[in-house]
Amino acid sequence: MASQPPVNEPTTRRRQLFGRLPLPERTFITDALRTETVGGVLLLVAAVAALIWANVWPEAYETVLDHTVGPSTPLHLDLTLEAWATEGLLTIFFFVAGIELKREFVAGELRSPSAAVLPVIAAVCGVALPAVLFAVTNSGSGGHLGGWAIPTATDIAFALGVLAVVGSHLPSALRAFLLTLAVVDDLIAILIIAIFYSSGIKLWALGLALAGLVLFWFLHRRGVHGWYLYVPLAFLIWALMHESGVHATVAGVAMGLILRCHRVGDEEQSPGEHIEHQVRPLSAGLAVPVFALFAAGVTVSGPALGEVFTQATPLGIILGLLVGKTVGIFGGTWLVARFTRAELNPQLKWADMFALSVLAGIGFTVSLLISELAFADDPALADRSKAAVLVGSLLCALLATVLLKLRNRHYRELCEEEDRDLDDDGVPDVYQQDDPAWRARTAKPVNHPANRATDGPDGPASDTNR
């Protein structure tokens, strides 16, 4: 059999899609995805718990959601627990998203235009096509165009939770693409929420919130430390943003974008990376699961499931997630390869990209949030939209599981190759193959026939007798 050329020796000058990540980026993404995977499993548990609670004890569920907590003056913070979860806890999630976005622009995949073009185009196509499908489905009588943004979001935590539950492996390059795609997706979702789902703007409150952000930026740039300063200031900015009529989660994103995410001097971590490392477990392990507990509780019955597939609004959401996200992301990736003359990593196939696109159709946290914002005046329609998000995400998860399982053995081999560390120095061997010192450390003596006597205590005579 003819020997194959090594994968790390390119045969053309074309840029490679989903090639090996630089070691620092791989390490950062591995740590980030580990937390998100745990959070994804908790998210799945919370969603199941919400469905059971809402269907077995519906009155208790509604009572808890509608329980009001907080002062009514001066900033109208007498909110229901559901609102605290939606606008309060999710602000932590969007704060982490803001840091991720900033880091991607200054130190990650988005810092280079040539590297950013793939996830940006894939994310834009993965947002545009679901919105178009929803609009077409709801263009007739009985449709509700206000929910066009519901099927546009990818939930990275839910997707990684599915991977963890089904035991599927993915090479680090595909996981990195999924994370970067979700970051760009979150940016688009933030802009959509700020522009299309904010109303009754109070300029005085918005102005004070912006002044608070300026103070936040000034203190951070001056190197002032102390959580006891930043946490109260962050809460004040959030409360003013909520009072202004702009969705309060925008405050979280803004504060995340303010943080410095590039390293200076001999810093091991930038301030943004350090804070993200501290806050991400709180976001993935508490904020998002609690939001899911309060948002995913919808009535499940035969008629309710029938409405999901027969009414225009929920059907548009399902088609947007299952068809729109898949075709949009896959098509955007293919267009990048076609028109930039980039080539796919020879260890992967386009079928892998299709399976990943299906997995990216899982929309949960942001989709549930937009369902509440889009149909705030119609709770019944909001519940049907949430049910459609759950059904669409479940269909994407099941289909992606089947497709990924078909290649799971190959993925496992790639992951083992990526993680192999023969000399136990903490650096995977694939990053040291050209280092003579590494080759010397890992070289094995050749087992010549003349030396086989050393293989056992009985020597060659013993081997002959055997």
Image (spheres, rainbow, N blue to C red):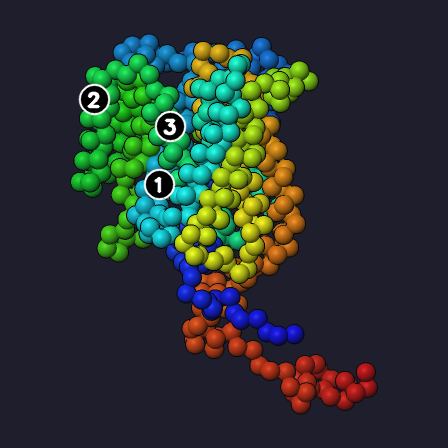
Would you say residue 43 is visible in this rendering? no
Relative horizontal placement of residue 167, taking residue 197 as reference (left or right): right
**Residue 192: mark:** 3
The circle drawn on residue 207 is 2
Residue 40 in the image: state x and y as whole percent: 53, 37
Q: Residues within 10 Å of mark 2 (few under 14, many from 20)?
A: some
The answer to which quarter of the image holds residue 202 is top left
Q: Which element type, helix, strand or loop, lies under badge 2?
A: helix
Q: Could you tell which of marks 3 and 2 lies nearer the N-terminus?
A: 3
**Disc 1 designates what residue?**
101
What quarter of the picture does the C terminus occupy?
A: bottom right
Q: Are marks 1 and 3 in contact (CB under 8 Å)?
A: no
Q: Residue at x 42, y 52 (%)?
A: 339
Mark 2 belongs to which amino acid?
Gly
Question: Is residue 210 placed above or below 436 in the rendered structure?
Answer: above
- Could you say where residue 459 lies in the image, as x and y percent from the top left? 72, 86
Most foreground residue, 228 or 439: 439
Identify whether 144 is placed above or below 334: above
The disc, 1 or 3, on the residue closer to the chain's N-terminal end is 1
Q: Which mark is residue 290?
A: none
Left or right for 61, reference 28: right
